[in-house]
Amino acid sequence: GSLKAPEGASGVFRIVAHLVAADHVSEIRVKDYVKPQFFVEVKSEQETLRGGDNLAAHIKVERYAGGAPAQTQFQYTLYRTRVSLPEWVGDAGMGESGSQTTYGFDSSPAASTSSLELILQGEDTPFDDKGEAEIDVKVPDKERGPYDYQYVLKIHAFDAEGNSAMGTKDF
């Protein structure tokens, strides 16, 4: 579906969906568009990541007009989420709960959990004069459980004038 905000509206709006005797709530923020001043690139030689591995990534911030923005810092967060498997994997008996169509609804917390779990968080870290920085951290070895996980590295860069940009890398 779609939702159209009233002309000239700004602020936080709450959306409530009533589905199967339960309320699902989300909020959106509406504000004037501000053209971003810079962007963030996140690169890593690693394609996958597991608990206990070292995460090494190269972060670069660059102004759209060219060059590195002055006095720019970043914070990083590393999340993990349960990997969603195709229905045929569950149908083949590969350890997942199957689909509602083939096996009925599995209402256990383990089967329904797919939210982002915070794994690591980094403090304000400055970029060098070229707008570059490195991250090299050990990923905590959390319990693995019966599921596979995808990791998401999120970078929030910001300058002294209050401008900001985000970059992400999936593992």
Image: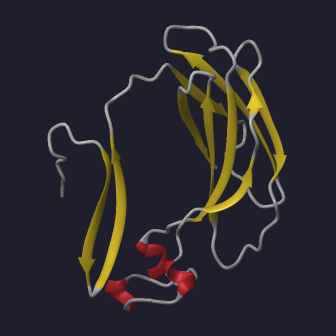
The total of numbered circles placed on residues is 0
Expressed as whole percent of the image width and height from the top left, the position of residue 2 reads 18, 54
Q: Give the vertical position of 84 relative to 73 (above or below).
A: below
Q: Find residue 54 and report its horizontal and vertical position in percent.
A: 83, 48
Q: What's the residue at 44%, 68% (across, down)?
A: 86
94 left or right of 123? left
Could you say where residue 129 lies in the image, as x and y percent from the top left?
Answer: 75, 12
Placement of 80 over or under 73, stated as above or below: below
| Residue at screen point 57% across, 62% down | 116
In the rendered image, the vertical position of residue 77 relative to residue 38, given as above or below: below
Instruction: Give the farthest residue toward the top.
Output: 66
The residue located at (56%, 80%) in the rendering is 94
* Residue 17 appears left or right of 52: left
Q: Residue 66's quadrant in the figure?
A: top right
Q: Quadrant of residue 67?
A: top right
In the depicted structure, whether residue 82 falls above or below residue 132: below
Observer-nearest of 171 and 159: 159
Q: Is residue 99 left or right of residue 53?
A: left
Quarter holding the N terminus is bottom left
Q: Position of residue 8 (x, y in %)?
A: 19, 37
Frontmost residue, 94 versus 122: 122
Residue at coordinates 72% horizontally, 42% vertically from top-left?
46
Colour theme? secondary structure
